[in-house]
Image (cartoon, helix red, strand yellow):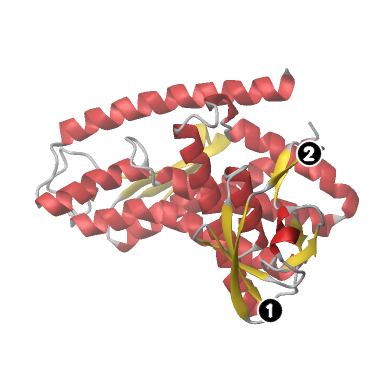
Amino acid sequence: MDNLGIILAILVFSFIVFFHELGHFSLAKLNGIEVEEFAIGMGPNLVSKEYKGTRYCLKAFPIGGMCVMGEDEEATDSPSNFNNKPVWARISVIAAGPVFNFILAFVFSVILTLMIGYDAPVVGVVEEGYPAYEAGLQSGDTILRMNGKKIHIFRDITSYNQFNQGKETEIVYLHDGEEKSANIMPKMDEESGYYRFGFSSSGYSKANIATAAQYGMYGVKFWIDTTLDSLRMLVTGKVGADQLSGPVGIVSVVDDTYKESRQYGVFNVIAQLLNIAILVSANLGVMNLLPLPALDGGRLVFLALEAVRRKRIPPEKEGYVHLVGITLLMVLMVFVMYNDIRRIFF
């Protein structure tokens, strides 16, 4: 792989992780919680400096990061101990990591929309011989809903079709200011092996600040919905576990994207990298909110139970659950890394 592609991948992934940990760090400091260490990367320290009670570290392996707060169960007399803070303060600290990921994805999405425009769900070409043409859809119609799902950008239409192949769909659309609907059964395109409705996008429109903010938000929602739909397919067995990808896979995707886009100039490279960064940041936010032990979502479950019960779950029991979660997570990471390496080199 090209060295510059690898470097770009590491920089993109490291910055996203840094911003996630910055969320935890910022809310911890805001709530007066002791932060023992704030680190980017994993493994031994390359650079380390202590400032106002916090050790800031840059570690050898630029994947991952951590914000280590004072959570010593024996330090119960310390007012800055994480566990001595009100439950809602602790919830804000844990939730801040994923929330910062969504904020970062939104900022990147606004920048990207200002650069390339937005894909409003407006019909461009309607192909004869396909169901959309037979149902009466015309160029210039705006797609509003598909089987009740609101459509904000044309990518929503593409994603819906991808996750609902061959499914009859009620399409609600706007034609000359009048709302209409049609039940459409997509048709198999033998050449591509893909079910299609038979209409395409009208293209991208230039954005101003207001539309960039609006469609930037839609872009983030698109990737959040795509992540959730992918998880549902994984749980239901429609997608195999061997299709999961991790940091090594991200490096490979960024490298391939860089190689393919660099021939079109720096502008195209930046746009493609921003698109990947939006996906990864939104994906990281969603995955960390899953109610699984060892993840932010798992910790939020225990804190929510504490808020309801007005009594903390015994620390030793919570610790045992998170230990099991970390063990399973490490096994999953090894499995995902094996898949990534197998796909790239074999």
The x, y position of residue 328, in whole percent, is: 38, 24
User: Disc 1 vs disc 2: Cβ atoms closer than 8 Å?
Assistant: no
Q: Looking at the image, which is closer to me, 12 or 254?
A: 254
For residue 137, say whether it is visible: yes
Name the residue that disc number 2 marks: 192
Amino acid at circle 1: Asn
Residue located at (39% from left, 59% from top):
26
Mark drawn on residue 323 = none
The x, y position of residue 122, in whole percent, is: 70, 68
What kind of element bears circle 2?
Answer: loop
Q: Is residue 13 left or right of residue 234?
A: right
Name the residue that disc number 1 marks: 208
The x, y position of residue 61, in whole percent, is: 57, 33
The residue positioned farthest toward the top in the image shown: 346
C-alpha distance separating marks 1 and 2: 36 Å
**Mark 1 neighbour density, 10 Å: few (under 14) some (14–19) many (20 or more):** some
Residue located at (57% from left, 33% from top):
246
